[in-house]
Amino acid sequence: MIHSVIFAQSSVSSSISSLKTKIKSKTPTQATIELTWEIPSKNNIVAFNIYRSNEQITKESIKDLEPIIVLTGRYTRYNDVVTDLEKSYYYCVTTKNVKGEEFDIIIPMVNSTVIAVTPLVKEKRNDTIAKKEGHVETAENERELVPLPYLNELEDANMEKKNINPADLKTAQKFSYTKKADSAKPIQILPEDVKPETGDQYLLSTIVNNYLKKSEWDKALEQLNDFLKINRTEDTYCRAYFYLGQIYYYKGDSKNAIFAFMKSQKVCPIESHEWIDEVLNSLKMQ
């Protein structure tokens, strides 16, 4: 029997969501880029770290960055002034809670931007070609004269993706903030783990059926962590993280839940994306 457990609404969040950027104003010498984001009504955030880079910010690259500013207090926007108008700018916002802990998970289009803001885009016109004898402007090559627009949200399904990690993009595109729920998502057991088989499969199935399905979160967490200490096949390794994510979700640990589901999405992407969506929705409701 699969039990449904009410999510701990008393837990507080340390995450932001819906980070967006746009050009607020521009002069010949500088531009103001406005950042806006959302925070849960119930949170323990005491500071916001604003990061800026000329390349997309990832969990690896952020280690080499210093915040351009630390905002202490309750904020949902920041205006950044830049002077090099031809450069492209990416942003990321992390938070610190009352304990001084940083919520440093990087989630594209949630707390980090995937489309650069470029205040001044160079024209694409090739004057040498334009001056060639017999050159005639057409509807096709006239487009080269028009500066490319800057985009701040993923609105075009055919947008340029070369600067976006494909795996992160697939995950981010599944995020949604519109679904409402009154209770927690029921425990989900993958078909491979319904009945114990052999080897790694047998052990993982035993943990899932003996502890996870009975809502024994601490015991299941302990057993799965022990399970992951031994070399496993990639398939069972990722499925173990899928169940870890559910345990952290029921325990109200959104940060570790998202991390676990990001690990499991290689083997069960649809299910993992749905759970990431659920975790984010639970934060929105707080």
Image: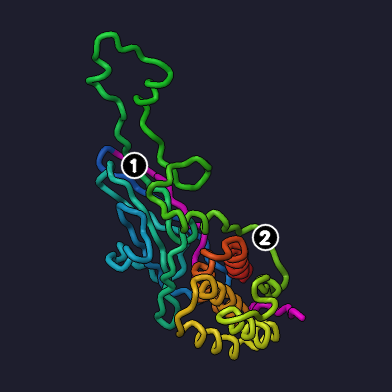
**Which x, y percent locates residue 4?**
73, 78
Q: Is residue 227 magenta?
A: no
Q: Indicate yes or no whether the magenta region holds residue 9.
A: yes
Classify 205 as above or below 286: below
What secondary structure is the stretch in magenta mostly built from? loop
Asked whether residue 69 appears in the rendered view, the answer is: no
Left or right of 155, for residue 96: left
**Residue displayed at 70% across by 67% down:** 181
User: Mark 2: which amino acid?
Assistant: Lys
SS label for mark 1: loop
Q: Which residue is mark 1?
A: 119
Element type at marker 2?
loop
Could you tell me which quadrant the C terminus lies in? bottom right
Q: Of the two numbered discs 1 and 2 on the same chain, state the one appearing first in sequence.
A: 1
Q: Return the x and y of residue 111 as percentages of the image width and height.
A: 46, 61
Residue tagged by mark 2? 179
> Residue 73 location, x and y as percent?
43, 71
Per the rendered image, the range of residues in magenta is 1-27
Amino acid type, mark 1 = Pro
Question: What residue is at 27 percent from the left and 37 percent from the top?
Answer: 28
Q: Nearer the viewer, residue 119 or 142?
A: 142
Q: Are marks 1 and 2 in contact (CB under 8 Å)?
A: no
The local crowd at label 1, few if under 14, some if 14 to 19, many if 20 or more residues have their Cα within 10 Å, is many
> Going by the picture, which residue comes out furthest to the front?
198
Q: Quadrant of the N terminus?
A: bottom right
Q: Is residue 25 above or below residue 114?
A: above
In-image side of 247 versus 214 (left or right): left
**Residue 175 higher or lower than 120, as above or below:** below
Disc sitting over residue 134 in the figure: none
The residue lying at 56 percent from left, 73 percent from top is 239
C-alpha distance separating marks 1 and 2: 35 Å
* Residue 49, visible in the rendered structure: yes
